[in-house]
Image (tube, rainbow, N blue to C red):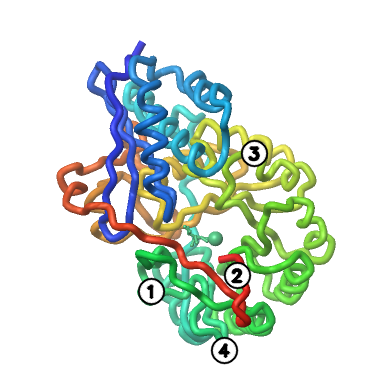
Amino acid sequence: MLKILDAKVVVTCPGRNFVTLKITTEDGIYGLGDATLNGRELAVVSYLRDHMIPCLVGRDAHRIEDIWQFFYRGSYWRGGPVAMSALAAVDMALWDIKAKAAGLPLYQLLGGACREGVTVYGHANGETIEETIAEARKYKALGYKAIRLQSGVPGLPSTYGVSKDKLFYEPADGALPTENVWSTPKYLNSAPALFAAAREALGWDVHLLHDVHHRLTPIEAARLGKDLEPYRLFWLEDAVPAENQAGFRLIRQHTTTPLAVGEIFSGVWDCKQLIEEQLIDYLRATVLHAGGITNLRKIAHFADLNHVKTGCHGATDLSPVTMAAALHFDLSISNFGLQEYMRHSPETDAVFPHAYSFADGMLHPGEAPGLGVELDEALAAKYPYKRAYLPVNRLEDGTMFHW
Ligand code: GCO
Ligand code: MG
């Protein structure tokens, strides 16, 4: 028995908001879990503080599956991003504790390494095609084997994925939501040209990816997939909003461009049909928003049976705690595909010192016991929470649209 003595939530904003759960046991071992839900951070804080922590204290930290079931099956109102992010934070912290108690890096408890490292993709973006390609060249020079390309859409004032700061992309940019403008015809006319130019300039020995950010209908996505086929994308991400899983059938019938989806999924019920019918190639669900390592492992095993690989979300709104958890997970599963990696700012890295490191296009979680991430609480306290929203999107005629 490794009794849980206490649990607390730390909110910090070293450039952006992060919510961290720290669970401490009677033996003095503690574990960290990330509970950050971009733009809705304080809802998860309340879920943890007001509803979960009172039930955690006194339990045996070793009983991870039972605690997971207690909070999932045991709550009448279950699922959804707020509850599943809170549950993920508890789960990550418990795995951190268990691995620290065993004196092993977490991936060893998950079955050991299936590969030498975790291949990652970086983000190259620019206002113009030329700018985007110049950025992609920098990633190639750093050793990246896979690069996501996003470029400005001519005729639109701003475009998803094209940041002011090339290195540290941060979409949650306003104390109230920023309003963007979108045009599907303009986008569909410009996206294939980016990849034609990129193949010409970068060659074929680098994987190229693209994120549509949920903005097309299935038939539009089918057309884009077909237009991009000559450029052999590694994946086309979030081509349509995924609420209607059957909608992917139509895209699938028309194109061989590999499909990825799932960064906003909270669990298997968001992707059961997508996996079962093999309508996607890569599942982007994360340890954080999909209920923790315990839950994501089950989903990944189910995906493996259906020829679907993983491609965990790894944007900067997931803290280094999630990045570490993802790396241990990625290293240990058989059907790993690719991991997203957007570097955190130096301020964030200082608040969360970590054992993972990048070399030759791969990340490795390191050999520190547990997740291998610390939280510098004194430094965290110097960066108080700042309200920040993700943008919203309207069509050119003013109609509210997906962001
Ligand atoms: C990605 C994502 C992010 C999200 C962000 C929202 O592929 O990395 O689309 O950029 O927009 O994580 O919170
Ligand atoms: Mg995305």
Q: Secondary structure at mark 3?
A: helix
**Residue 31 on image: x %, y %:** 32, 31
**Front-most of 324 and 155?**
155
Cα–Cα span, label 1 and label 4: 21 Å
Q: Amino acid at mark 3?
A: Val
Q: Amino acid at mark 4?
A: Gly
**Front-most of 287 and 142?**
287
- Give the residue at mark 1: 166
**Residue 33 on image: x %, y %:** 37, 37
- Give the residue at mark 3: 268
Cα–Cα span, label 4 and label 3: 39 Å
The nearer-to-camera label among 2 and 1 is 2
The nearer-to-camera label among 1 and 4 is 4
Which residue is at 60% across, 65% downward? 402
The nearer-to-camera label among 3 and 1 is 3
- Residue extending furthest right? 253
Cα–Cα span, label 2 and label 3: 29 Å
| Ligand 2 has an atom within 8 Å of the beta carbon of the residue at disc 3 | no
* Precedes in sequence: disc 2 or disc 4: 4
* Precedes in sequence: disc 4 or disc 3: 4
Tell me the number on the disc at residue 262. none
Q: Secondary structure at mark 4?
A: loop
* Precedes in sequence: disc 2 or disc 1: 1
**Residue 95 on image: x %, y %:** 41, 29
- Give the residue at mark 2: 400
Q: Amino acid at mark 1?
A: Lys
Cα–Cα span, label 2 and label 1: 28 Å
